[in-house]
Amino acid sequence: METTELIEILARDEDSRHQFKANVTNEVSLASEMLAFSNTQGGMIVIGANDDGTISGLTRDDMGRLSNLVSNTASQQVRPPINPVTENLSMDGGLVMVVHIQEGISKPYMDKNGVIWVKSGADKRRATSREEIQRMYQSAALIHGDEIPSGIPVSDINEPLFSSFYEAEFEEPLTEQDIPLSQLLNNLNLAKGDILNIAGALLFANNVQYRLPAFIVKCVTYPGVAVDEGEYLDSQDVTGTLRQVFDDVQGFVLRHIRRVQGEQGVNSLGELEVPKIVFEELIANALIHRDYFVTAPVRVFIFSDRIEIISPGHLPNNLTIENIKNGNSNIRNPILASFATKLLPYRGLGNGIRRAIKAYPEINFDDDRDGNMFKVTINLPVKNQEGTVF
């Protein structure tokens, strides 16, 4: 790090990625700061700087002591241990140590008392909500949102639907199996005991919307370019099994986008202004890869100039928008993903985003980590006064 870069950081004040300390003498206090960065988005601790960004300065003796303190804290006060990187800089006013801490890949990180610390703006706080802690376990692949119990009993399964799937997949009638249905569902990782997990409920349960009302899709069409609660053209709360939801959401979108004649005759239906495969890929991704630890619906907003598909949960772990454009993937809900390859037009190879962009490049992505959501924006072709789409 250049000193000019550090001066700019100090001038901007503390935030969720930067913490200033005049000096540090206590391992427990330092551990909580390190944990908060490791459990959130990473960041740096600048030791030798006051809260107002001025340099308090450290001595050479301080630097040696702090180097040992940082090392001991990272290995003995943090579970699992982390690996911070330190830099020593000479500034006007004295020496400064910058401790760089990466976002962890083995969340949640805890102190010796089992406390989980996270960043909250420029401050830190204890993680207390069940959903927040579950998401940390999810990021470490220790638990997945689609495998937690749904509260829906196995007896609520749609037997004709499951029977049809079972026979098509395993080429054996369900009625000829000599084990109970609940055991069969457990074997397929769709239930735990007599309770369906989230995946089992979303794939095969009756009336799932009554027991899992947050996991629906809300679709709204607006006449203009902004959300207007007082004026909309159409709306629908889409519920049912995963396949029903996929079909109905796609149907809603296709009803509200234009068709263009192109070189076809005036009596033809015309071609969709955005290829159908774009919606197949993006809707399937929203349903399969959303964060099921977040109790909120997927939202589909259709405006005059664009379509937005907003999924609860930002991209998992260290995935970035560039990663997914290049075909990289990180499966958040492995049970749903494995069954979706059999029930939806979904291949599960990480290429869905690439296929959508190849078919229609006017797609933007927003990975909102602060808002904990992922938004896909499909920009619609502009229509001039003569009605020509371009």
Image (cartoon, helix red, strand yellow):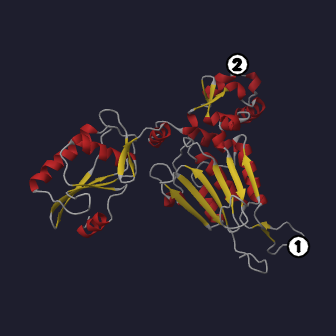
Q: Amino acid at mark 2?
A: Asp
Q: Secondary structure at mark 1?
A: loop
Q: Secondary structure at mark 2?
A: loop
Q: Amino acid at mark 1?
A: Val
Q: Quadrant of the N terminus?
A: bottom left
Work out whether residue 242 or residue 211 is closer to the camera in this orientation and state it: 211
Q: Position of residue 34 (x, y in %)?
A: 30, 46
100 lies above or below 173: below
Q: Quadrant of the C terminus?
A: bottom right
- Residue bearing mark 1: 266
Give the crowd class for mark 1: few <14, some 14-19, many >=20 residues within 10 Å: few
In the image, what residue occupies the spot 81% across and 75% down?
A: 263
**Which residue of the protein is positioned furthest toward the front in this rendering?**
230
In the image, what residue occupies the spot 70% across and 38% down?
A: 209
Q: Position of residue 15 (x, y in %)?
A: 36, 57
Work out whether residue 205 or residue 323 is closer to the camera in this orientation and state it: 205
192 lies above or below 123: above
User: Horizontally, is 62 left or right of 173 in the view?
Assistant: left
Q: Quadrant of residue 140?
A: top left
- Of mark 1 and mark 2, the one earlier in the sequence is 2
**Which residue of the protein is positioned furthest toward the right in this rendering?**
267
Give the crowd class for mark 2: few <14, some 14-19, many >=20 residues within 10 Å: few
121 lies above or below 1: above
Q: Position of residue 292 (x, y in %)?
A: 57, 42
Indicate which label's residue lies in the foreground, 1 or 2. Answer: 1
For residue 129, which numbered disc appears in the image?
Answer: none
Q: Position of residue 247 (x, y in %)?
A: 75, 49
In the image, what residue occupies the spot 74% across and 51% down?
A: 236
- Residue bearing mark 2: 178
Residues at marks 1 and 2, CA–CA distance in whole angstroms: 59 Å
Work out whether residue 11 or residue 301 is closer to the camera in this orientation and state it: 11
